[in-house]
Image (spheres, rainbow, N blue to C red):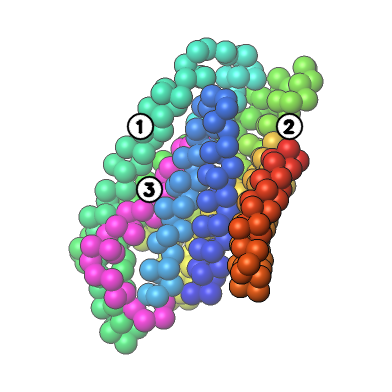
């Protein structure tokens, strides 16, 4: 698991930082609601991946970061789970209004309203995650040789019922209801596009649908096993050591699959999103040109310094020639760029 978490951390961190870097180049135009939601989606994924090194260390050395860090990381994980699916549901609803009902209201193009909508989403997700923040504690488990583990700690007499309630809350509010909203929106969108071909809208829709499908494929197995575990906790399904061990392993594996979703959105933007791919290419081109300019400047400085040491009598002439060449080179570079 530490290796898996490390790979997800590196890919998720790099990918989502690239997303934010590319989006920052869009300052020449106003953000739409969908643009703003996608930015917040990248931020949510970044918040999640920064917690993964803590859990990677836990698997190797136990939890060594204290109770405060335990509560914060547990809370961030829950907030990300809720915020991702709610942001995707909002993106789907925005596309539904724009394509099916051709809604062109001014508030859909107002970044202030978009940020207010995202602030409401974050507030709701934070409220839903209070349970995880409150119950997350550092425990020493005898099964693991007394190693410290950061996990939910419920009262022993009501632990099963609390866990079942938490699983159902995550399943209904963090997966099922938003998923129903997304499915309804895209069914109606597909029906609308069948009657009126709109190439540009179809291209943008392809990106959004890919993001939603990736979310479902990554998180559906985890939520399905959470449902089974909740039913086992309330004894709706017969308990057994073999079943509980299988659930523990299955939840661990499917949780890793869900966490990998943090890396997928940037890849989908790059492979499916034409505009994003072009803007990313421009970004890399700009960075490459800056590096070449720096190397050229350093090499010119080095050359000038060597000449001055070898030909001290021509120091002023050499310096003037270098300055002239540098200006010419810079001008040529600016014109070409």
Residue marked by disc 1: 120
- Which residue is rendered at x = 33% and y = 58% of the image? 74
What's the mark number on residue 79? 3
Q: How crowded is mark 2: few (under 14 residues within 10 Å), some or many (20 or more)?
A: some
x and y percentages locating residue 305 in the rendered image: 60, 67
- Quarter of the figure that contains the C terminus: top right
Magenta stretch encompasses residue 63: yes
Look at the numbered disc 3 and give the secondary structure of its residue: helix
x and y percentages locating residue 148 in the rendered image: 29, 77
| Magenta span: chief secondary structure | helix
x and y percentages locating residue 78 in the rendered image: 38, 52
x and y percentages locating residue 138 in the rendered image: 25, 70
Q: Which of marks 2 and 1 is nearer the N terminus?
A: 1
Q: Earlier in the sequence, mark 1 or mark 3?
A: 3
What's the mark number on residue 203? 2
- Tell which tag, 3 or 2, sits nearer the viewer: 2
Q: Which residues, given as a range, are shown in magenta?
A: 59-88
Q: Earlier in the sequence, mark 3 or mark 2?
A: 3
Q: Quadrant of residue 14?
A: bottom right
């Amino acid at each position: 698991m530490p290796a898996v978490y490390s790979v997800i951390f590196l890919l998720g961190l790099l990918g989502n930082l690239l997303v934010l870097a590319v989006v920052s180049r869009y300052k020449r135009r106003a953000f739409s609601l969908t643009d703003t939601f996608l930015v917040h989606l990248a931020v949510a994924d970044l918040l999640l991946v920064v917690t993964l090194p803590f859990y990677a260390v836990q698997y190797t050395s136990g939890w060594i970061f204290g109770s405060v860090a335990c509560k914060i990381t547990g809370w961030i994980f829950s907030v990300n789970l809720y915020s991702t699916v709610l942001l995707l549901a909002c993106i789907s609803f925005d596309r539904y209004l724009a394509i099916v009902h051709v809604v062109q209201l001014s508030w859909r193009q107002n970044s202030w309203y978009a940020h207010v909508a995202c602030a409401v989403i974050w507030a709701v997700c934070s409220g839903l995650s209070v349970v995880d923040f409150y119950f997350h504690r550092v425990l020493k488990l005898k099964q693991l040789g007394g190693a410290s583990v950061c996990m939910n700690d419920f009262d022993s007499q009501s632990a099963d019922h609390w866990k079942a309630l938490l699983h159902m809350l995550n399943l209904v509010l963090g997966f099922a209801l938003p998923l129903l909203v997304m499915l309804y929106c895209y069914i109606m969108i597909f029906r609308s596009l069948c009657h009126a071909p709109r190439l540009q809208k179809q291209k943008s829709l392809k990106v959004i649908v890919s993001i939603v499908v990736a979310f479902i494929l990554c998180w559906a197995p985890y939520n399905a096993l959470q449902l089974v575990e909740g039913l086992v906790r309330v004894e709706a399904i017969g308990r057994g050591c073999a079943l509980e061990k299988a659930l523990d392993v299955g939840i661990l594996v499917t949780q890793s699959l869900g966490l990998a979703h943090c890396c997928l959105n940037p890849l989908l933007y790059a492979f499916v999103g034409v505009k994003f791919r072009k803007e990313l290419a421009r970004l890399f081109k700009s960075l490459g040109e800056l590096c070449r300019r720096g190397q050229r400047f350093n090499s010119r400085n080095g050359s000038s310094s060597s000449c001055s040491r070898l030909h001290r009598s021509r120091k002023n002439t050499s310096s003037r020639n270098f300055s002239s060449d540098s200006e010419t080179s810079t001008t040529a570079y600016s014109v070409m760029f």
